[in-house]
Image: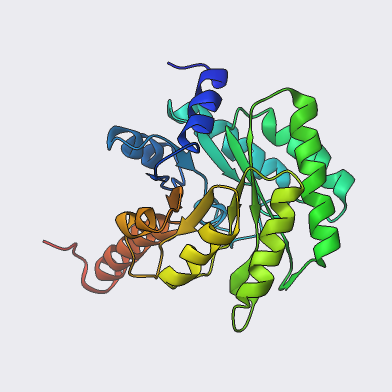
Amino acid sequence: MPTIAERRAAFRALHQSGCFAIPNPWDGGSARLMQEAGFKALASTSAGAAWALAKNDGEMTADEVLEHLRFLVGAADLPVNADFEAGFADTADGVAANVTRCVETGVAGLSIEDRTGNDLYPIEVAVERIRAARAAIDRSGADVVLVGRCEAYLMKPVDMDEVIRRLKAYGEAGADCLYAPGLKELGQFARKVRELDKPINANITGTGLSVADMAGVGVRRVSVGAALARAMWTAVDGHIALLAKEGRLPS
């Protein structure tokens, strides 16, 4: 079994060239299945983890998320990137304290969102939070990849100029990788790659695009968010409904 330091080094190396898929397990069984399928890294999903606790996305406490991350790190031999939501704090100092705790779980990467409720933090506040997360990782001495996230799906419609402005600022504040969930068009991903000088993460859920499509425009890593967890729950819901209504399971 690789050490935490070895997993972190391997994860850092994945960001140097090429394109890799990073699927999102929600429990130990799904993490093991993804490892056995040959993936090189995993990423947690806040929604999938919350559903497993009969909660909605965003309702898990920091302590619950940290325990979940410790479990995922122990469940598989792969590097784990943490969906650390908005750092579970509004202030930069609070984000720094929680990022320190997140690093201690053994994760190889973690993301910090710029979302507060159904709005985005003012860019100056969002940048200060990323800067605080970077400083906390540096103080830990751990080689953890920091992902700066712009929650573009909150924009109606998506303002690509603002997405680029925010992600550029997050990169300058210390983010190693940049991510804007909610983008749907290949041209949007290509623009991010062209205009930003950091590795780009893309989510292909609901886009109709493939990992190969993303690799073709220079995206470095591809995730799926809660899509796999949602597919599992959808299948289970159908089985439960059939058993409750007709007393049988699908043949």
Q: Is residue 127 placed above or below 240 in the rendered structure? A: above
Question: Residue drawn at (52%, 16%), measured in percent from left and top?
Answer: 3
Q: Residue at x 60, y 50 (%)?
A: 197
- Can you say whether 1 is above or below 217 in the image? above
Q: Quadrant of residue 155?
A: bottom right
Residue 89 visible, this orientation = no
Picture layout, residue 16 above or below residue 19: above
Q: Quadrant of the C terminus?
A: bottom left
Total labels drawn: 0
Please tell me which residue lies in front, 8 or 62.
Answer: 8
**Residue 8 lies in quadrant:** top right
Q: Nearer the viewer, residue 50 or 105?
A: 105
Q: Does 148 sit left or right of 99 as displayed?
A: left
Residue 59 drawn at (x, y percent): 66, 58
Residue at horizontal 81 percent and vertical 36 percent from the top: 135
Q: Position of residue 196 (x, y in %)?
A: 60, 56
Rendering coords of residue 128 (x, y %): 84, 52
**x, y percentage for residue 199?**
54, 47
- Give the camera-side residue of 67 and 206: 206
